[in-house]
Image: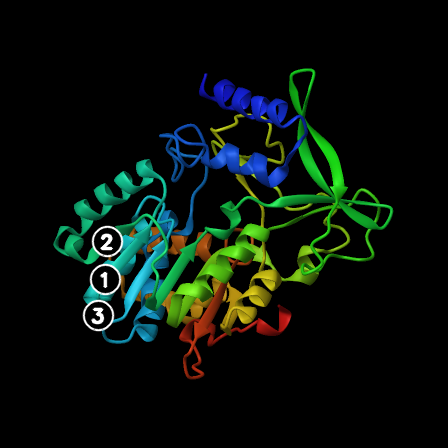
Amino acid sequence: MQEMKLKQIIKNAIIQKAAPLGFDEFMNLALYYPAKGYYTGGKQKFGEQGDFITAPEVSDLFGFCLAKQCAELLKKDDDLLEFGAGSGILAAQILFELGRIGKLPRTYYILELSAELRQRQKQTLKKVLPELMDKIVWLDSLPQRFCGLVIANEVLDAMPAKRLINENGSFKELGVDCQNDNLVWQTLTPYKNRKILLPTEVETGYITEVNERAIAWINSLGDFIDTGFVLLIDYGMGRDEYFHPQRTAGTLQCHYQHKTTDNPFVHIGEQDITTSVNFSDIADAATSSGFDIAGYGTQAMFLISLGIEQYLAAEKDEKRHSNLAQQIKLLVLPSAMGESFKILALSKNQQAVKLSGFKEQDLTHKL
């Protein structure tokens, strides 16, 4: 019932506009329409009972390793800001480990626009770390000024993207129209943002995505961060791989009950819709906004550099040791999350520093 209601709202938007919606407009409605969108409704999204599993849900070791990197970057009186904290599990893992090693930030901010997710985060953190609740502050909007560390885990991929199709050597936007009461793809006008690099030698019919909103978001970080670091964790790749000639259908993925398709017109409001991150675009926007690139690499090598295997070696209980080994495989194996997820680190007004997370691998030259 909810799906049909939101689908009808989107159809009505097309009818009212008397023209197709850009795919980014459609994606924004499907994910964020008040109370009915995927991220604004009450449906469980993360974990085995949801539609997909994020790294913090796979293992506490993900957050513990990330906390080790945070501890290296946080200075006295620095704050930590997490965007889109999901179920709150990553915040719990980071705060637990930072508390254990005596490196807690002054304040742990969470910027979360979903009231349902915000409530879930509060429940998670109150249950796990009741003694630290006075350090956690939820925000409705970006702070005006900030010094410290910003973390965004799987945030960029959920930002509405434009889809483009190559027709005879030039790219046009792909939009969403309503025909015979069905939502269908519709080719729109030529894409004219000359600031974004696109592939030049691809076949007619080649589809890809560009994410202007993600680039604008990076620019907004540059506006409010005075000094500090940013850690961006997401699935994606550099420009050369993103625009590989064989990637003819783009990177659009829809997740529903742990099944993946490329059809955004079903289960509207009940399935996640994402596109992979073009980390080269993000890095270009970051440097234009006053950041330096402090490191870029795969999730696998980032976690290995931060000593994920040390947690395994320290575990003496045989059953728990076996469970941790399986969790680590999911986080680092190329066939799981190890290669597809990347970490991009940015710094602003900092002296050049080599981050421990990129000790074993730094792929900045591939951006």
Q: Which residue in the protein does label 3 denote?
A: 101
The image shows residue 168 at horizontal and vertical percentages of 87, 46
Query: Quarter-wise, where is residue 240 in the image?
Result: bottom right
The image shows residue 162 at horizontal and vertical percentages of 63, 45
Q: Which residue in the protein does label 1 denote?
A: 107
For marks 2 and 1, the one nearer the N-term is 1
Identified by mark 1, the residue type is Thr
- Local packing at callout 2 (Cα closer than 10 Å; few below 14, some 14-19, many 20+) is few
Q: Is residue 361 above or below residue 119?
A: below
State yes or no: discs 3 and 2 in contact (Cβ < 8 Å).
no
Q: Is residue 81 above or below residue 323?
A: below
Closer to the camera, 111 or 332?
111
The numbered mark at residue 137 is 2
Q: Between marks 2 and 1, how big is the CA–CA gap?
A: 7 Å
Q: Is residue 139 left or right of residue 301?
A: left
Q: Is residue 107 left or right of residue 218?
A: left
Query: Quarter-wise, where is residue 37 in the image?
Result: top left
For marks 1 and 3, the one nearer the N-term is 3
Q: Name the secondary structure under disc 2.
A: strand
State yes or no: discs 2 and 1 in contact (Cβ < 8 Å).
yes
Please identify, in this view, whether the residue under mark 1 or under mark 3 is nearer the observer. 1
Residue occupying the point 65% across, 16% down? 181
For marks 3 and 2, the one nearer the N-term is 3
Which residue reaches farthest bottom? 351
- Local packing at callout 3 (Cα closer than 10 Å; few below 14, some 14-19, many 20+) is few
